[in-house]
């Protein structure tokens, strides 16, 4: 069976599980990518992918077809990721309230001289530091930044995906970029 | 000459300037200070692209489907079925539970080998067993509170949501263990409980009486509380008295 997304949605809506399977098989990989970037954790990303498809199946009658199915799924996965990251943060805050007050930015401790970015990239250190910097973002900042930067969504669409005003989405992206700059600039400036 | 703000530079980077056509681009041509700032912003944002996503296998989509497929047709039918069919399906769920309870016995059976003091798998299993029993009890409490709520006005369930969210995170270990040991029936019950808790945790924090009724009907239709009770009692039967935690003690 090689259905278009629209035809598969239409059949899935009528209760055809095979048609929904085709949608799952087709869209799982890009959703995993999005979920991983938003959660920063492989197991969480896999949970998000599964939960997103189940949520989509329950809500498929509400899918009006104005956006592509993939776009709709991205919105659902973005919200699932955001919920999961927020829940994780609430739990961490509750478990270690005293540990969060230092305000020290670990990236600020980086020496201004050191291995070149190329070497850092080779060793995986650069990626680790980027991941750490991403983890420092608030859930909303991270979600908005991932959708804008990695998924190439316009600010307006980011707002729509995260169910907030475009202005709020824009400011989340601004705050995210500012934090990433503070954290990563020392590493990029050594190449100059 | 007024300089470009960081926000304007970010919008320029993403090609989303407001207002005059490429005013930021023209300014950057003329202003070395802004150009330097923009260069630094570009470098950081380009470096962020080095963040990699783990590779998933080519058949990843099929794997996802295998994990979720048993929920898909069932949910659909539940959603649309009439009350009579719900009872039929509840009976089927009950039969499935008996299998699950039996499998729970196998899953939690202690190792017949004498345990060594250092790496004692039986002790580890016992701890896990007590933890699963505790997890099931706490899940049941959250769900019973919601099932028994009978408000006249919208009810704030944020406290229950938080507990549900915690339980969801906690259950991962138990599900993974069940999956690893091949106890699909136990995994299936934990999965069902997990899914309801996840929906509660991620749903609206205020539920109208009608929405609460939907939750209640779902719990009934899927036999969730019954599943918890049966699995919980199977777990308790295999814990043994020495595995019981002292009063008030939590793992």
Image (spheres, coloured by chain):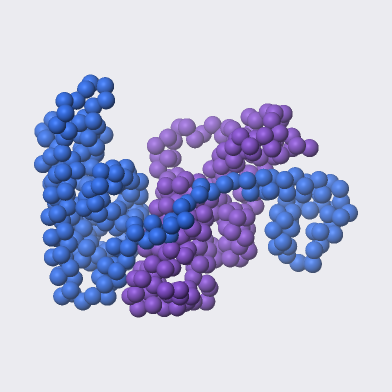
Q: Is residue A28 above or below residue A124?
A: below
Image coords of residue A39 (percent x, y): 49, 49
Residue at image coords 29%, 62%? B70
- For the C terminus of chain B, the image quarter is top left
Q: Quadrant of residue B176?
A: top left
Query: In the image, what residue occupies the spot 34% across and 57% down?
Result: B67
**In the rendered image of this protein, does residue A136 appear above or below residue A152?**
above
Left or right: where does residue A109 sit relative to residue B244?
A: right
Chain B visual colour: blue
Q: Is residue B247 visible?
A: no
Q: Is residue B204 left or right of residue B90?
A: right
Q: Identify the residue at image location x=67%, y=34%.
A: A119
| A5 left or right, relative to B10 | left
Indicate the position of residue B122 as horizontal and vertical percent values: 20, 31
Point out the residue furthest to the top here.
B117
Q: Position of residue B128 (x, y in %)?
A: 24, 37
Q: Is residue B229 left or right of residue B43?
A: left
Please tell me which residue is depicted at 69% across the width and 58% down the height of the picture.
B14
Above-or-below relation of B205 to A60: above
Q: Which chain is purple?
A: A
């Amino acid at each position: 069976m090689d259905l278009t997304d629209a035809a598969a949605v239409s059949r899935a809506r009528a209760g055809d599980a095979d048609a929904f399977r085709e949608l799952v098989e087709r869209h799982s990989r890009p959703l995993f990518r999005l979920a991983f970037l938003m959660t920063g954790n492989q197991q969480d990303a896999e949970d998000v992918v599964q939960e997103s498809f189940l949520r989509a199946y329950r809500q498929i009658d509400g899918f009006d077809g104005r956006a592509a199915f993939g776009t709709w799924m991205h919105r659902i996965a973005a919200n699932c990721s955001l919920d999961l990251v927020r829940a994780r943060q609430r739990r961490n805050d509750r478990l270690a309230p005293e540990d969060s007050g230092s305000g020290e930015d670990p990236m600020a401790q980086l020496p201004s001289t050191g291995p070149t970015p190329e070497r850092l990239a080779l060793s995986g250190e650069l990626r680790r530091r980027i991941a750490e910097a991403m983890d420092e973002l608030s859930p909303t900042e991270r979600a908005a930044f991932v959708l804008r930067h990695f998924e190439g969504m316009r600010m307006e669409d980011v707002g729509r995906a995260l169910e907030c005003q475009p202005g709020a989405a824009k400011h989340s992206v601004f705050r995210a970029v500012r934090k990433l700059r503070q954290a990563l600039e020392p590493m990029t400036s050594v190449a100059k | 000459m007024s300089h470009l703000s960081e926000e304007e530079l970010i919008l320029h980077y993403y090609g989303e300037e407001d207002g005059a056509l490429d005013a930021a681009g023209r300014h950057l041509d003329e202003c070395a200070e802004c150009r330097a700032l923009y260069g630094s912003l570009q470098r950081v944002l380009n470096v962020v692209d080095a963040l990699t996503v783990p590779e998933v296998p080519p058949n990843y989509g099929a794997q996802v489907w295998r994990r979720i497929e048993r929920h898909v047709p069932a949910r659909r039918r539940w959603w649309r079925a009439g009350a009579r069919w719900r009872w039929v399906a509840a009976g089927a769920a009950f039969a499935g539970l008996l299998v699950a309870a039996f499998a729970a016995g196998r899953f939690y059976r202690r190792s017949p080998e004498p345990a060594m003091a250092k790496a004692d798998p039986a002790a580890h299993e016992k701890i896990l067993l007590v933890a699963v029993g505790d997890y099931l009890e706490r899940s049941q409490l959250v769900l019973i509170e919601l099932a028994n709520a009978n408000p006249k006005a919208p009810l704030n369930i944020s406290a229950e949501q938080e507990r549900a969210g915690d339980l969801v995170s906690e259950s991962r270990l138990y599900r993974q263990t069940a999956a690893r040991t091949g106890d699909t029936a136990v995994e299936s019950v934990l999965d069902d409980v997990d899914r309801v808790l996840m929906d509660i945790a991620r749903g609206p924090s205020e539920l109208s009486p009608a929405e609460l009724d939907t939750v209640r009907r779902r719990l009934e239709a899927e036999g969730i509380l019954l599943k918890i009770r049966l699995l919980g009692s199977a777990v308790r039967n295999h814990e043994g008295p020495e595995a019981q935690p002292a009063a008030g003690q939590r793992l």
